[in-house]
Amino acid sequence: MGDFGAWLKAAEPALRTSAAAVVTERGRFTWSSLVDRARTLAAGLPPAPYGWVIPPGGGEHTVVGLLALGLMDRSPRWVLGDPATWSAPGPGTTGGAEPVPAGPQAAPPPHVDGPTYATATSGTTGRPKLLFGRPHSMAEAVELYVGGMPEYASAEVFATCSAIDFAAAFYMVVAPAMWLGRDLVLFRPSRWQTAVPELAGRPGICLAPPAIAVLGARTAAARRTFRGTCFVPAGGGLTPDRAERITEGFPASTFLTMLGSTETGLLTVSREVRGDGHVGRPLPGKPVWLEDAGPDGVGTLWTRGPDTRFAVTGGRLTARRDGSVSTGDLARRSGDGGYVLEGRADDLVKVDGVSVYPREITAAVRALEGVVDASVSVDRSGPLDRITVVAVGDVTEAQVRDACLRLPTPVTPHRVVRRHTEESAYDERGKVLR
């Protein structure tokens, strides 16, 4: 593939002259000061045969690590993820915020050469895996988002409470802020007081799980106006009711609801909040199409673009030589040129011999009064699939089981887990704890 130089070099002049900063609970750090720290860090990094692991939870320290590896003259491989899982054994690999040498388990598949980066995901399997992309494609991905969404072009601030190794947080918030030299706000789900002053009265993008954005609305408490703030729901699950609760606390805010995945990047965008499965139109400039469509028009979604992943370790990625990747989602075209989801090609499970889609269970539980969120997990290790339902909110196990039994195809969950406190019901990526 050739010898690639620094993938972030083109952005350095804008960062050095920008008045914007990275904002965390520890304070405000200008991009110029972080670039200086990154240059010093990069000069002291020793050779690392498998590249580097950047701990994702270090706030501005993590950003310095990204900048350091992005400004190195010879672009290295790197992973944004947990050092305890992906680094080489040795002192200092389980703590701290600076990059640490990666181990062989973090290497891309043998056929992949040249610089790569990766973020970790466990998907629905619970087994960590790395999905690889090319760092030199990041500038093109940011250009795609800025060119296709006016909200991104005008944003003065990008904010997220999700861990930045979560693919959506990295692509949709961190990368644009870094390439454009805009304010970047990194905060914990319980620390909305860090983000609210930065978002108020400014055009900006805030990526947060819907239920956690509802908590933020309580913190904001309608004391300011948020005209220009666009909320991007991380992990899906944005309903009209939740949108109303969010805008009560964040007056004049709007939404960018998006369909995408770790493998595919962003596919479709909608500025409506709907509950009928409509996921909007393709992102301008990003090819999206259906394959193997049946007589009912339902087929599998495919895409390609600079934000897609092309290789995986610890799992399987359906990618073609031309970079096309399947989402695994079943969808049909809508009359307005968009898409309507119809489930997932691999989502069908058998429970006591009955075919069930977990999304139908989740929707039924979320519809219960008092429920804030819900998730469904499937254990396929035994002779029969066993379903666990997690319900977040003020609800009883009996109510959850009754909702499952009232489905068109009744379901009896193997286990029901109730979580009452929203703050403790989500992991650092905003996913419902299972």
Image (cartoon, rainbow, N blue to C red):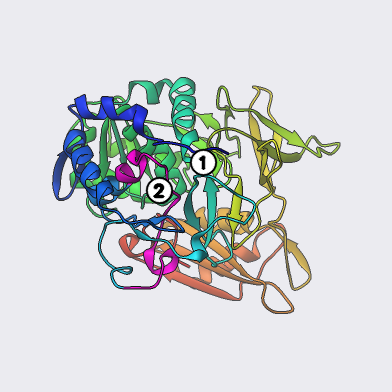
Rendered residue at 40%/48% (across/down) = 209
Left or right: where 131 falls relative to 381: left
Left or right: where 216 falls relative to 76: left
- Percent x, y of residue 391: 47, 64
Q: Nearer the viewer, residue 74 or 368?
A: 74
Helix, strand or loop at label 2? It is: loop
Q: Nearer the viewer, residue 396 or 174?
A: 174
Left or right: where 184 falls relative to 411: left
Amino acid on which disc 1 is placed: Arg
Residue 186 visible (yes or no): yes
Q: Is residue 29 above or below residue 105?
A: above
Badge 2 is on which residue? 209
Q: Which mark is residue 134?
A: 1
Amino acid on which disc 2 is placed: Pro
Q: Which residues are magenta?
A: 66-90
Helix, strand or loop at label 1? It is: loop
Could you say which quadrant of the image residue 54 lies in? bottom left
- Percent x, y of residue 64: 26, 46
Disc 2 vs disc 1: Cβ atoms closer than 8 Å?
Answer: no
Q: Is residue 212 above or below residue 11?
A: below
